Amino acid sequence: MKKEPRISVGIMDRQTGINGRLNGGFAAQGFGPVSGIFSAKTASGTIVLADGSGREIGRSPSIRFGAGDGSTFALFRVIIGNRFHWERKEDQVFEGDLVLQYREDETIAAINEIPLEDYLKNVISSEMSGTAPSEFLKVHAILSRSWLLAALGRKENNVEKPGPGEEISEGQGEIIRWYDREDHDLYDVCADDHCQRYQGITKIVSPEAEKAVRETRGMVITCEGKICDARYSKACGGLTEDFATAWDATRIPYLVSISDAPVSHHAIRTEDEATRWILSEPEAYCNTKESALLDRILPDFDRETTSFFRWKVEYGREELERILREKSGIDFGTLEEIAPLHRGPSGRISRLKITGSKKTVTVGKELEIRRWLSPSHLFSSAFVVTTEHDRHGNIERFVFHGAGWGHGVGLCQIGAAVMATRGFKANEVLGHYFPGSAIRKAY
């Protein structure tokens, strides 16, 4: 790679209408200069563009707004945290060009085209706080750059990358699904947690974040001469997880379980070990309750999640039966047992048996388990389940004690931020979470 690439980011997709504002001068291809409030909707195979008063400006299947110097654009009611427990809508502001693209299902995609390094300063200020320690911001700049360039490299070389995977065996009562990063058809990457958070300049892009991107320009982590597919999650819970626990059964040498601590923690092998681990408070970088530190490193909506290293969720039996019906589409009847069949080394469950009076089903992998057992998502699949009974001995309540926040594979964001506050350098942090990796310049 000889120079910095320009990338396309899907901000909103499959929308029947999009509203926003052009701040400053924009050149709309085929329509001339435009600015101010705009709306877009579909009609007869095209996008109809209108100004703030509703007057039609023009129509086309694809509308490109080229940004003038210092110009930005806003998109209204953008969904963030799609299908996660922090899902909400907010107005967001972006630099770069805006493309509105018509889809054959009569919806619109809003796409931001921007140089990769400008994209990164917004990513690290959206994934974490722009006020986080400078060494951690460098870590995240290298991490996020690696993640994206690895995907672009596969796309450029026509290497097939599996998206959602599924193994369904109705005869054996198993539903095993995983959700890997999909190759998007109209853009390189989406803007939400399913790819990387990218909320533009809506979030505070601090001078420290800009400096971190500038000082690591073009730097990536590599293993065996290839750019690493650098996965990460919010908090591992003390042990990171193997790639295969969350996605397809592939061993990736730098995405293996490690102890997130200055001391060694042994991999989880049995249910007894899982129970002792999850019900304990082991030493770990991500085991921090320092509110001042969390305020410094986490975005505002992430700070709403106060218990992430160890957590507890309770459901009445009938409530959990209803959640399972809604999320899985299966009527289990009276819920009788929830039993782990296989765990990864961090304690995360990849196969879980759910037994009811009408149906018994084994579900996996970790994200599908988290989706089935919560109105949104459980924090992680590293949990143990206990039951409470009424005076007749019938199950009345299910209690989940859990560890960590996210899939746990690769870098632990809160753990890495804590390492940075303790004086670790970016190369040391990345070497800790991605064993066998090295840093090099891609451009």
Image (cartoon, grey):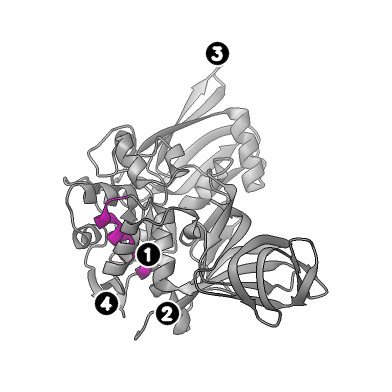
Q: Residue 271, relative to residue 397: is it above or below?
A: below
Q: Name the secondary structure under disc 1.
A: helix
On the rendered structure, is 362 left or right of 133? right
**Are the residues at dot 3 and dot 2 in contact (C-beta closer than 8 Å)?**
no
Q: Earlier in the sequence, mark 3 or mark 2?
A: 2
State left or right for residue 288 relative to residue 184. left
Using the rendered view, name the quadrant where residue 396 is placed: top right
Q: Residue furthest right?
A: 44
Q: Quadrant of the C terminus?
A: bottom left
Marks 1 and 3, Cα distance to the nearest angstrom?
Answer: 54 Å
Q: Residues within 10 Å of mark 1 (few under 14, many from 20)?
A: many
Above or below 286: residue 120: below
Q: Is residue 140 magenta?
A: yes
The residue carrying pointer 3 sits among few (fewer than 14), some (14 to 19) or many (20 or more) residues within 10 Å by Cα, namely few
Give residue 264's position: percent from left, percent from top: 18, 47
Residue located beneath label 1 in the image: 144
Q: CA distance from mark 2 to mark 4?
A: 14 Å
**Residue type highlighted by circle 2:** Pro
Question: Residues in magenta?
Answer: 132-145
Q: Residue at x 53, y 57 (%)?
A: 177
> Mark 4 highlights which residue?
441
Closer to us: 269 or 11? 11
Badge 4 local density, few (<14 within 10 Å), some, or many (20+)? few
The residue lying at 17 percent from left, 47 percent from top is 262
Residue highlighted by disc 2: 5
Mark 3–mark 4 CB contact (< 8 Å): no
Q: CA distance from mark 3 to mark 2?
A: 66 Å
Which type of secondary structure does the marked residue at label 2 adopt? loop
Indicate which disc, 2 or 4, sits on the residue closer to the N terminus. 2
Looking at the picture, which amino acid does disc 3 mark? Arg
Image quadrant containing the N terminus: bottom left
Q: Earlier in the sequence, mark 1 or mark 3?
A: 1
